[in-house]
Image: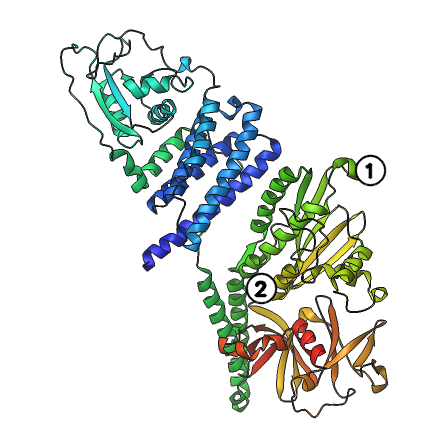
C-alpha cells in the first residue's frame, strides 16, 4: 500500500471510529429515555450516509451495505417521524441498532487488522429489511400527500401499463427499479422524497406506496409514475433521477399521445448508472446536503464545528523528543564552564537572554505535551455500553454514574488503561452487584445498583476509581481461598485487611464458583495490575462487606516528562520520580534494626521498612557506606514501601524520559529496577529508577 492509500485508510478508520463512538453515545443516552429525539434520528441518518459513502469509496462492501440498509431504515423513520413507531418497535429498534453498531465495529476491526471482510452478511441485512418492512406496514395513510391514483388509465405507456388518471399532468416519468432490490415500495418512496427535498412540484403513483406493502408487486410488474405539470419540473426531476440508486430504467410519457403512437424515450438508465454514487461518494454527499437542507433545523445542542485536524501519534512523539532535546541543549548552554570567563556585564546580559529562552522552552514544552493530552471521556463512554449490555443479559437494574470525564490524560496512557477499566466494570456488574432487587432491599439498599466511575487530577497523577455498592469482599473468605490455592506466603493471622484484599491481584486467584460469560471479581486482576504498573501507575483496593468495593488506579499524567529527584551514589546519578517519594531523612546507627534474616530495617511512623542500599545492589564504588553519612529516601509504589540509601540529594527537576535502546533488553535492566534514562544539563546520563521493580529485584537478591 502506497503512502497515499495508507493516509486515506488512516483517515477513514479515524473518521469511522469517531462516528461509531458518536452513535454509541446517542444510542445509550436515548435508550435511557426510551425514545429517539428528532435530532438524533437525523444525526444517525447522516452518520450512516457518511459511513456508506466512505466505505464504498474504500471498496469495503460489507460496511457500505450494512450502513446503506440502516440509512434506508432511518430514512423511513425520519420521514414518518419517530412517534409513528409503537413502543415495542422502538425497543426492538434499540436492540437492532446496538447489534448493527457491533457488526460495523467488527468489520472495522477486520480492516484495522488486515483481515478479510465478511463476504456473506445477507442474514443481518435481511433482519434490518425485515424490521423496516414490519414498521412500514403500520404507518398512517399518506393519501393526503398526493391525489388518489386513478383505477383506469387514459393513456398507455410503451409496455402496456396504464397511465394514472391525472388530467392536470403535462408529462409522466415512468420508472422501473432494479430486479430483486427488495422493499420496492420504500425504494420508490425514497426516490420520491429525494425529488421533494429539492423543491420539485409533482405527484406520484401509486400514491400509497410508502404505507401499503401490497404496492411492492405493482412496482415490480409495472414500475411507478411521477406526474408533472410543466416541462421545467420534468427536466429538474430527470437530473435528480440520474443520481439515485436502484433505478434500472426510466422514460418520459406524454399523456396526450395515442396508444398506437410510440412515446419518445427520454433516457434509458443503464444498470451501471445507479452504482455511480457508490464509487464516487461526492455525488451522494451532495444529495445528502440537499436532503439535510430541507430537513428540520439542527438541534441546539449539536456540537459546534471546530477547526480540528488528526495527527499521527508518532509525529507527536517526535515533536516531544525534539522539544526534550531543546530543553537539554538549553541546559547544557547555560551550564557551560566557559561562561565563567565572561566579563560581568556580558555574563549578566547572557543570563538575561538565557532566562527568556528558558521561559520560551518551558512554554514550548507545555504546549507540546498538551497536544498529546486527550479527555478520558472516550474511555468512560464505552463503559456505558458495557453496563447496558450486561444489565440486559444479567437482568440487573444498575446505573452507571460518571464523574470527571473531562479529565485529560496522555494518549499513550489512555490506550493502556481502557482494558483494565473495562475489566473492573464488568467484574462489578457480574457479581459485585447483588443478583436481585429484593436482595438489595433486604440489605437496606436502593433497589437499583450503582457503579461509579470517576477521574480526577492529583499532583502529577490522574486518579481513576471504580466503585460499586454491592456485596463487598470478605477478607476471611479471600484468605481461605488463597490458602486452598497455596498462594499464602505467611500465616493467615499476619495478613492485614489491605493485604488480604490484595490477594485477588495474584495470578490464578478467583472467587467465582462457576464459569460465566463474564469474568468474576479476581479473574484477570493480575493482568489489570500488570497493565497499570506498565505505565507507571499503581492499583489499590478497599472494600467493606455488605457495603461495596472501590478499586483505585493512580496513573502518571504523561510518560514523556516526569518530575524527579536527582540523587548520587558514588560517581553515578539516579533519578527517582517525585510521585514515589514520601520522605527523605537521616538516621543514626542505633535507629537501624535487623530482622531475623539480618536485613536492615528502620522505623517510620510506627512501621518498620526494609532498607535497600543502592551501592550494594548495583555494586557501585562509593565512599559513603555509613548509614549516618548518607540519606534515606522513604519511597512507595503500589503496595510496596521501603527506604533507599543514597549518598546525597542534588535537586528536583523535570526530566525527559528516554527509553533504553532495544539491544539492552537481553540484559534484563527493566527487571533490575531501571525504567529508562535522561540526559542532564551537563550532558551526563542519569538512570531513572522504577521503584516497584527495584524492590522486587532487591528483596530477592538480599
Question: Quadrant location of residue 653?
Answer: bottom right
Relative height, residue 601 to residue 256 (above, below): below
Measure how far apart labels 2 and 1 are at the Cα level.
Answer: 45 Å
Q: Secondary structure at mark 1?
A: helix
- Residue at image position (56%, 72%) is 657
The numbered disc on residue 466 is none
Mark nearer the N terminus (2 vs 1): 1
- Residue at image position (41%, 17%) is 212
Q: Secondary structure at mark 2?
A: loop
Between marks 2 and 1 in the image, the one whose residue lies nearer the viewer: 1
**Residue 179, x across and y down, in percent:** 30, 27
Question: Quadrant location of residue 53?
Answer: top left
**Residue 524, x across and y down, in percent:** 64, 57
Residue matched to label 1: 442
Instruction: Please state which of residues 599 and 535 is positioned toward the viewer in this rendering.
Output: 599
Asked if one can make out residue 480 in the rendered structure from this viewpoint, the answer is yes
| 242 lies left or right of 417 | left
**Residue 565, x across and y down, in percent:** 66, 76
| 317 lies left or right of 263 | right
Q: How many marks?
A: 2
Relative height, residue 168 to residue 3 (above, below): above
Residue matched to label 2: 558
Amino acid at each position: 500500500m502506497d503512502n497515499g492509500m495508507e493516509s486515506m485508510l488512516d483517515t477513514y478508520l479515524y473518521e469511522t471510529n469517531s462516528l461509531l463512538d458518536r452513535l454509541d453515545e446517542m444510542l445509550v443516552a436515548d435508550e435511557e429515555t426510551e425514545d429517539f429525539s428528532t435530532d438524533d434520528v437525523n444525526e444517525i441518518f447522516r452518520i450512516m450516509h457518511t459511513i456508506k459513502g466512505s466505505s464504498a469509496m474504500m471498496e469495503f462492501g460489507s460496511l457500505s451495505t450494512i450502513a446503506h440498509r440502516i440509512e434506508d431504515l432511518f430514512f423511513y423513520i425520519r420521514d414518518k417521524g419517530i412517534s409513528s413507531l409503537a413502543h415495542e418497535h422502538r425497543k426492538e429498534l434499540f436492540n437492532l441498532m446496538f447489534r448493527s453498531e457491533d457488526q460495523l465495529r467488527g468489520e472495522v476491526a477486520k480492516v484495522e487488522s488486515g483481515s478479510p471482510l465478511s463476504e456473506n452478511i445477507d442474514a443481518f441485512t435481511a433482519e434490518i429489511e425485515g424490521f423496516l418492512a414490519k414498521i412500514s406496514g403500520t404507518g398512517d395513510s399518506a393519501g393526503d400527500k398526493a391525489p388518489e391514483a386513478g383505477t383506469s388509465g387514459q393513456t398507455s405507456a410503451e409496455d402496456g401499463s396504464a397511465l394514472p388518471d391525472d388530467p392536470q399532468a403535462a408529462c409522466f416519468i415512468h420508472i422501473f427499479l432494479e430486479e430483486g432490490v427488495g422493499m420496492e415500495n420504500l425504494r420508490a418512496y425514497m426516490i420520491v422524497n429525494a425529488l421533494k427535498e429539492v423543491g420539485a412540484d409533482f405527484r406520484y403513483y401509486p400514491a400509497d406506496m410508502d404505507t401499503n406493502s401490497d404496492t411492492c408487486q405493482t412496482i415490480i410488474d409495472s414500475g411507478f409514475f411521477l406526474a408533472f405539470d410543466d416541462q421545467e419540473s420534468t427536466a429538474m426531476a430527470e437530473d435528480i433521477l440520474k443520481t439515485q440508486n436502484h433505478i434500472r430504467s426510466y422514460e418520459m410519457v406524454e399523456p396526450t399521445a395515442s396508444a398506437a403512437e410510440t412515446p419518445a424515450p427520454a433516457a434509458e438508465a443503464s444498470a451501471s448508472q445507479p452504482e455511480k454514487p457508490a464509487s464516487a461518494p461526492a455525488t451522494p454527499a451532495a444529495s445528502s446536503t440537499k436532503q439535510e437542507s430541507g430537513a428540520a433545523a439542527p438541534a441546539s445542542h449539536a456540537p459546534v464545528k471546530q477547526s480540528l485536524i488528526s495527527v499521527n501519534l508518532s509525529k507527536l512523539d517526535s515533536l516531544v523528543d525534539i522539544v526534550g532535546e531543546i530543553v537539554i541543549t538549553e541546559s547544557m548552554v547555560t551550564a557551560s564552564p566557559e561562561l565563567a570567563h565572561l566579563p560581568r556585564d556580558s555574563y549578566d546580559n547572557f543570563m538575561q537572554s538565557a532566562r527568556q529562552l528558558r521561559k520560551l522552552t518551558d512554554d514550548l514544552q507545555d504546549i507540546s505535551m498538551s497536544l498529546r493530552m486527550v479527555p478520558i471521556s472516550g474511555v468512560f463512554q464505552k463503559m456505558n455500553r458495557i453496563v447496558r449490555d450486561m444489565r440486559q443479559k444479567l437482568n440487573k437494574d444498575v446505573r452507571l454514574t460518571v464523574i470527571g470525564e473531562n479529565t485529560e490524560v496522555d494518549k499513550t496512557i489512555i490506550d493502556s488503561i481502557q482494558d483494565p477499566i473495562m475489566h473492573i466494570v464488568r467484574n462489578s456488574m457480574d457479581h459485585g452487584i447483588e443478583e436481585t432487587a429484593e436482595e438489595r432491599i433486604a440489605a437496606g439498599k436502593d433497589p437499583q445498583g450503582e457503579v461509579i466511575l470517576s477521574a480526577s487530577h492529583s499532583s502529577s497523577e490522574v486518579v481513576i476509581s471504580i466503585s460499586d455498592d454491592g456485596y463487598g469482599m470478605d477478607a476471611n473468605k479471600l484468605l481461605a481461598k488463597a490458602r486452598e490455592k497455596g498462594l499464602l506466603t505467611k500465616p493467615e493471622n499476619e495478613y492485614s485487611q489491605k493485604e488480604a484484599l490484595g490477594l485477588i491481584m495474584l495470578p490464578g486467584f478467583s472467587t467465582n464458583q462457576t464459569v460465566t460469560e463474564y469474568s468474576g471479581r479476581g479473574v484477570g486482576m493480575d493482568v489489570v495490575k500488570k497493565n497499570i504498573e506498565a505505565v507507571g501507575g499503581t492499583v489499590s483496593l478497599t472494600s467493606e462487606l455488605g457495603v461495596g468495593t472501590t478499586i483505585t488506579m493512580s496513573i502518571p499524567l504523561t510518560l514523556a516528562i516526569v518530575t524527579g529527584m536527582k540523587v548520587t551514589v558514588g560517581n553515578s546519578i539516579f533519578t527517582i520520580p517525585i510521585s514515589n517519594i514520601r520522605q527523605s531523612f537521616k538516621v543514626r546507627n542505633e535507629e537501624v534494626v535487623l530482622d531475623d534474616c539480618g536485613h536492615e530495617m528502620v522505623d517510620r511512623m510506627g512501621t518498620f521498612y526494609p532498607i535497600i542500599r543502592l551501592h550494594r545492589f548495583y555494586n557501585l564504588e562509593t565512599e559513603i557506606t555509613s548509614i549516618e553519612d548518607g540519606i534515606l529516601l522513604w519511597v512507595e509504589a503500589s503496595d510496596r514501601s521501603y527506604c533507599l540509601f543514597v549518598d546525597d540529594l542534588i535537586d528536583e527537576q523535570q526530566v525527559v524520559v528516554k527509553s533504553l535502546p532495544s539491544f539492552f533488553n537481553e540484559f534484563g535492566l527493566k527487571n533490575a529496577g531501571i525504567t529508562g534514562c535522561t540526559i542532564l544539563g551537563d550532558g551526563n546520563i542519569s538512570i531513572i529508577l522504577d521503584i516497584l521493580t527495584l524492590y522486587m529485584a532487591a528483596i530477592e537478591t538480599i
